[in-house]
Amino acid sequence: MYNKEYWDEYYRDPDNRKAKNLRSAAHYARYRESILRNKREKRREEPENYRASARKWHATNKDRVNASRREAAKDLAKRDPVLAKLNNMKRSRRRKALLAASTDGSVTACAIRDLIVRFPCCPYCDVLLDETNRVLDHKTPLAAGGPHSAGNLIPCCRVCNRAKSDMPYDKWLSSIGRSNEH
Ligand SMILES: [Zn+2]
């Protein structure tokens, strides 16, 4: 009979764990084709399950996903600069369309100037902002249905903006240990 405690104890030993990993790797190398085929079939048969677990994986591995996207973009720029440029144009067109669809008309030059004056430092990490590192962050991301409005914009530094990505504002603040002061 399977004794969980016994095996848990057994695999606490690094040597046993290492041997098991080697066996797994050998098994994978030997049956790679059929393992991948089974996975593909399962994905075709249960697309909903597959999508749900893929979404979950992406949400918990955001850093890895973003890093590999950046790598892929760099790769493509080297391999096929024309296609890379086309992709960038598509992305910026999509971004412009999203901005146009989400705007309420309150983001005037005056409103932006006012924000810049009110926030001399990044509200997330306190670094001094200037034209080289300042970006305007949508507190509630456009992708999450936030409006392109003066009230939803806050100046912050490029680094924080990238780290925040499309995280909801409250979740982001609590993840960096700050309260909602703005
Ligand atoms: Zn910052």
Image: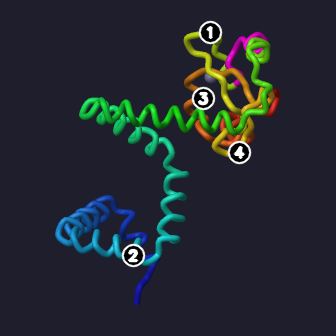
Q: Which mark is residue 71?
A: none
Q: Is mark 3 within 8 Å of ligand 1?
A: yes
Residue on which the image places disc 1: 130
Q: First in sequence: mark 1 or mark 2?
A: 2
CA separation in Å, label 2 and label 4? 33 Å
The picture places residue 151, in percent across and down from the top left corner, at 80, 29
Residue on which the image places disc 3: 161
- Residue drawn at x 41%, y 69% is 9
Find numbered disc 2 in the image and state the secondary structure of the residue it sits on: helix
CA separation in Å, label 2 and label 3? 38 Å
Q: Mark 2, residues whose alpha carbon is within 10 Å: few (<14), some, or many (≥20)?
A: few
Query: What quarter of the picture does the N terminus occupy?
Result: bottom left
* Residues marked 1 and 4 touching at CB (< 8 Å): no
Residue on which the image places disc 4: 145
Q: Amino acid at mark 3?
A: Asn
* Residues marked 3 and 4 touching at CB (< 8 Å): no
CA separation in Å, label 1 and label 4? 28 Å
